[in-house]
Each structure stands twice: as C-alpha cells, then as structure tokens.
C-alpha cells in the first residue's frame, strides 16, 4: 500500500499522506490541500466520504455489521456488562474494576439532585410540549445552576462534570415524562442501582411502593448499552462541533439532543411506532407501505430502515429484535405491532429495492416495541435514546477537547451571485 495519494489539478501534481487506523481503515490527510493548491477544497454534502476526526472510542464496520466500544464487541457488552460499566468504558477507555465502578456510581449519586428551580422551568412548558424539546431546554438550563465551565486540563474538574451530568440527566428524563403525565416530580433512591433508580423515578405512583421488575431493569439496561455510542453520527458530530468552540459540556449535550430529535436520526424510533400503528390501523397492509416507501413521488420512507454506515444488518437491531421477543414473552404481552414489524422486515429483506440499496433494519426498528411494552409513552422513545447516548456524547466531547481539536468550521463552494452594484429602491 502506497503511503500517499497524488492529486493532479491543471497539470500540477500534489501528494497527500495516507493515514491508516488501527482497524486498517485508510484516509487521505488533506489538512494542507487548500494551502498547497492555492485554494482548492473538497465538497461532500452530509460528509458521506469525509472523516471529521481521529477517534479511539467506537469502531463500526458497516459492511460487516461490526460495532465495538473501545475494542469490546457490542454483543458481549450487551450480554455481560451493565450500562454504568459501559458508560465508564466509553468515557475513560477501560472497563472499571469493582472499586472503580462502586466509586463511579457513588460519585454519580452525590449529584443525583437538581436545583428545585428547575421545576419552575419545567412548569412553564405546556403538557403538549414534545419531551425532546423539554429535555434539550432543561439540559441547557443546567448551565444556569452549574455556571462554571469545565477546565478540561483538570482531570478532577472533568471527572466532576461527568458524574454531575450522569447524576442529573436521568432526573430530567424522568421529570420530563412525569410532567407530561401530570405526575409529581420525585427523586428515586440512592439505595438503588442506576437503571432501577431511573425506572422508579419514571414509574413510581405517589400512593404505592414501586416494585422493581427485573425484566424491565434488564431490558432497559440492555437498550441503554446498545444506544450508548455510535462514532460520528449526526448528534455526536453536533456535540463535538458545539464543544469545539469551547462551549460548555451541558450546552453541547443540549445541542446533541436537538439533533437527535430529527426523524431521520433518533426520532426514527417514535416514527417507526407511529408507522407500524398506521399500518395496523390500515388493516396490516404492509405491501401498500412497501410500495409507498419505493415510490419516489411519495415522501414516505420505511422508518427504522436504512443507515448511513450499515450496509448490512445493524448489529444492535439483531440484539433488540431478540430482546423484544423475550421481553414481550416474559411480560406476557401480545403486541400485533411486533408481528407487523417482523412481516415488514421479512418482505423488505427480499425486495430488490431494499436489497439493491442495502437497506436493513436499524437500531430504531424494534426498540420502540420494547419501550411500549415497558409502558413508556411513544413521545418519550427518543428521550430514552438520548439517555442511552449520553455517555457516548460525553466521551466524544471529552476526547475532542482533550485532543485540543480546532474549532469546527467547514468550507463551502459558493454558487450564488457574483459582484453586483447596489440598486436603489427606485430602480428595483
Ligand atoms: C440512527 O448515523 C448513525 O450512526 C445514526 C444512528 C446512531 O446510533 O446514532 O445509527 C441512529 O439515526 C439510525 C437511522 C434512523 N433513521 C431512520 O430509520 C429513517 C429512515 N432511514 C433513512 O431516512 C435513511 O436510510 C438514513 C437517513 C438513515 C440514511 O440516509 P442516507 O445514508 O443519506 O441514504 P440516502 O437517503 O441517500 O438513501 C440512499 C437510497 C435512496 O434511494 P435512491 O435515491 O438511491 O433511489 O436509499 C433510499 C433513498 O431514497 N432509502 C430509503 C430509505 N432509506 C434510504 N427508501 C425507503 N425507506 C428508507 N428508510
């Protein structure tokens, strides 16, 4: 393999180094391109071919359907680790030992309260407000109550900011749901595990003891692990570019939540359930919706299908599909939506339109079926995605700042009007 790429422009040749990653991916380092060529840049809408950074956090191979966090396979992590272990792994680079994990959780618990004035902000929202908009606002509002920005050169300050947001974010998630349901805004209990505490804050009725259901705890723990990071996706890139201006961690996370909300990204898990409901209401006519998805004149897309990187089965979708069947079975829930989803998936995987475009079910296709079986409202599905993605966003933000990456500022190709003199209004 040559160690350089050569570009020829107007008879001039320019060499650019080839860089190879630890998984033998090869990239052309074009850091000097504009300088050496007198202003030539590249253009790549959606960055389909452009790497924004070097990263050591998550590796995925879209052709082979491989996903690893810090070298560990998603299959093993989903099976053998818990969410807090995976959060620690993503953020600090290694799986924690017992003492490290206990200290991590204990430090997180110390921050598992929010200023009571947050409730006043929450009260200002109408019940009809979408939980993602509420969550993005509350996350940004945390800055008002924790104003000191993170000195990333201080390990202690960085660590404190991390355990602070890991402690407070689940409260914002739970209270966002409770607000919509008109339920009181309570705390959980410091005697509970991280995921148990989240479930108690979300579901405890004021007049009853909340009884933990291990099926729900395991299902949520696994879903959060599967959503924890995914290299340079839209919302993570948003978190990184926001932080690259040295904006604070909380507001960078708030920007990521906003990006995740979109139905082409994290919002797809809600859109999938709504689509499956529509198909069910329409008599389960999956063929009609397959035809709509293939009809270029129809804006309808098969939500939960396709992926920018995976051109094979999303490994997370495989795991979630099995988990959905187990959870519904364990809960004794018969949900016709799951059968419609499986039918749609089987049809699409045989249909040339989807096969030729390598469109497979992604992480969002089955996740909502589990959330619904757990009693989570459909508008909260993307909030649950954000809860899972939080450690990945933190890890990526931390990596970007610790590596002292430059402020993100892409170039463009201008295709507008060339110079023209001002025209007085009387001449227009
Ligand atoms: C997530 O990036 C990540 O890692 C994201 C994520 C993460 O963990 O962070 O994995 C989470 O966002 C998963 C994706 C959730 N979104 C959806 O399920 C929405 C439906 N899917 C799409 O809209 C689409 O597949 C994207 C947005 C996911 C990917 O879009 P791309 O890579 O820009 O591909 P494209 O839009 O250029 O599509 C290529 C072709 C087009 O047809 P042609 O123009 O070649 O004829 O495939 C078609 C598209 O029309 N196509 C679909 C389709 N997805 C792509 N046609 C019907 N239904 C679909 N779902």
Image (cartoon, rainbow, N blue to C red):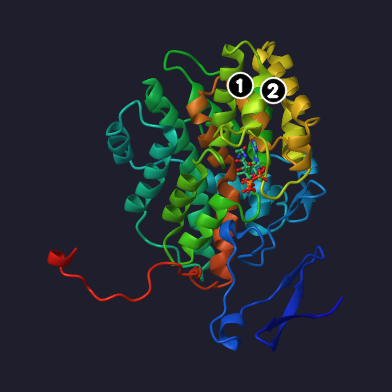
Q: Residue at x 48, y 69 (%)?
A: 409
Position of residue 385 measured from the top left corner of the image (x, y, whole percent): 57, 38
> Percent from the top left, x then y, of residue 117?
29, 40
Q: Which mark is residue 401?
A: none
Cα–Cα span, label 1 and label 2: 7 Å
Horizontal side of 424 relative to 130 (left or right) equals: left
Q: Is residue 137 left or right of residue 281?
A: left
Residue highlighted by disc 1:
276
Whether residue 217 is visible to the viewer of this picture, yes or no, is no
319 or 175, which lies in front?
A: 319
Quadrant in which the N terminus is drawn: bottom right
Q: Secondary structure at mark 1?
A: helix
Q: Quadrant of the C terminus?
A: bottom left
In front: 3, or 115? 3
The image shows residue 277, relative to residue 64, as above or below, that is above
Residue displayed at 46% across by 57% down: 249
Q: Give the quadrant of residue 245.
A: bottom left
- Determine whether the residue tagged by mark 2 lies in a helix, strand or loop: helix
Depth order, front residue of 301/21:
301
| Neighbour tally class for label 2: few under 14, some 14-19, many 20 plus, Cα within 10 Å | many
Residue identified by numbered label 2 = 341
Tag 1 near tag 2, CB within 8 Å: yes
Residue 161 visible? The answer is yes
Across the whole image, how many numbered discs are drawn on residues?
2
Q: Quadrant of ligand 1?
A: top right
Q: Which residue occupies the extreme front position in the image?
A: 427
Residue 388 x/y as whole percent: 59, 41
Which image quadrant is residue 31 in? bottom right
Left or right placement of residue 16 versus residue 35 in this view:
right
């Amino acid at each position: 393999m040559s160690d350089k790429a050569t570009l020829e422009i107007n008879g001039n040749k320019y060499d650019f180094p080839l860089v190879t990653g630890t998984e033998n991916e090869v990239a052309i380092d074009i850091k000097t391109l504009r300088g050496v060529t007198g202003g030539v840049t590249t253009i790549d809408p959606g960055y389909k071919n452009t790497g924004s950074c070097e990263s050591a956090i998550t590796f995925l191979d879209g052709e082979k359907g491989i996903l690893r966090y810090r070298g560990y396979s998603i299959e093993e992590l989903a099976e053998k680790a818990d969410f807090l272990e995976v959060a620690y792994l993503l953020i600090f680079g290694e799986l924690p030992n017992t003492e490290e994990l206990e200290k991590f959780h204990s430090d997180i618990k110390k921050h598992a309260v929010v200023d009571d004035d947050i409730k006043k902000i929450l009260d200002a929202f109408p019940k009809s407000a979408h939980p993602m908009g509420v969550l993005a606002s509350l996350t940004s509002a945390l800055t008002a109550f924790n104003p000191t920005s993170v000195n990333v050169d201080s390990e202690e300050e960085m660590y404190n900011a991390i355990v602070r947001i890991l402690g407070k974010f689940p409260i914002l998630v739970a209270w966002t749901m409770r607000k919509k349901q008109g339920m009181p805004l309570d705390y959980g209990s410091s005697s509970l595990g991280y995921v148990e505490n989240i479930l108690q804050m979300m579901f405890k009725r004021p007049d009853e003891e909340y009884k933990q259901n291990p099926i729900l705890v395991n299902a949520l723990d696994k879903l959060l692990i599967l959503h924890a990071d995914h290299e340079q996706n839209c919302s993570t890139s948003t978190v990184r570019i926001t932080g690259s201006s040295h904006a604070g961690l909380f507001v960078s996370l708030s920007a990521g939540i906003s990006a995740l909300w979109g139905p082409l990204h994290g919002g797809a898990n809600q859109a999938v359930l709504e689509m499956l409901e529509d198909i069910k209401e329409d008599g389960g006519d999956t063929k009609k919706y397959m035809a709509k998805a293939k009809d270029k004149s129809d804006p309808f897309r098969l939500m939960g299908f396709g992926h920018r990187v995976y051109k094979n089965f999303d490994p997370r979708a495989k795991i979630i599909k099995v988990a959905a069947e187990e959870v519904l079975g364990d809960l004794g829930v018969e949900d016709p939506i799951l059968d419609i989803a499986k039918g749609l998936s089987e049809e699409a995987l045989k249909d040339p339109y989807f096969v030729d475009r390598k469109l497979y079910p992604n992480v969002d296709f089955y996740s909502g079926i589990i959330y619904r079986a757990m009693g989570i409202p459909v508008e909260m599905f993307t909030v649950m995605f954000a809860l899972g993605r939080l450690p990945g966003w933190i890890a990526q933000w931390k990596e970007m700042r610790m590596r002292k990456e430059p402020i993100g500022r892409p170039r463009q190709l201008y295709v507008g009007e060339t110079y023209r003199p001002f025209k007085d209004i009387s001449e227009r």
